[in-house]
Amino acid sequence: MFETEPDPCWTTIVCGNQENLLKAFTLCWRAFAPDIQVGFNDSDYDWRFIMERAYHLNILEWMWERMTGSFKSSEEIIKWNYRGKVEAKSENVFKMKKYPVKAPEEGEEDPEEKEYMGGPIKIKI
């Protein structure tokens, strides 16, 4: 294991092994609870690796339950929720706001931003 100098700009989570790394990732994901997740290679390549490793380490159900709030067996996750259904319609429903969005004036708080701000994040493995 490599030690690193503390940096006040970063939170370092020392995991020790792949299983703990995936569990820490899951708990961080749950703590932030994103509505939408975007990033480099996030749609297929990275998720496939994460799901396969979790499956082989027998923690896929644990991860799924904490990330989605629902329980499914590993087989269900791999077959239907991870690899996808043939010709399945997306269940994502995006709705436009019924009122025009006005940007906040300088120095004014954005009510939408405030709505999504959470409290402190606590992670325990």
Image (spheres, grey):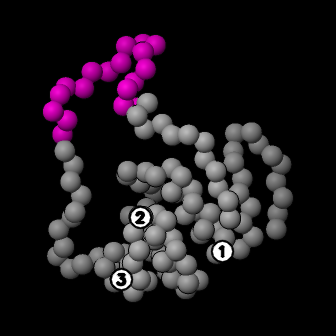
Depth check: give the residue in front, 67 or 79: 67
Residue in the image at 19% along x and 45% along y: 95
Across and down, in percent, residue 18 comes to: 66, 74
Residue 13 seen in the figure: yes
Crowd class of label 2 (few under 14; some 14 to 19; many from 20; radius 10 Å): few
Residue 45 seen in the figure: no
Q: Residue furthest top?
A: 106
The amino acid type of the residue labelled 3 equals: Glu
Which residue was labeled with disc 2?
Answer: 68
Quarter of the figure that contains the N terminus = bottom right
- Ranked by sequence position, the earlier of labels 1 and 3 is 1
Q: Quadrant of residue 42?
A: bottom left
* Residue 116, disc: none
Which residue was labeled with disc 1?
Answer: 18
| SS assignment for the magenta stretch, majority | loop
The amino acid type of the residue labelled 2 equals: Thr
Depth check: give the residue in front, 27 or 10: 27
Q: Are marks 3 and 2 in contact (CB under 8 Å)?
A: no
Across and down, in percent, residue 86 comes to: 20, 80
Asked if residue 47 is positioned above or below residue 34 in the image, the reply reads: below
The boundaries of the magenta stretch are 96-113
Q: Are marks 1 and 3 in contact (CB under 8 Å)?
A: no
Which residue was labeled with disc 3?
Answer: 76
Across and down, in percent, residue 16 comes to: 75, 70
Q: For mark 1, give the secondary structure.
A: helix
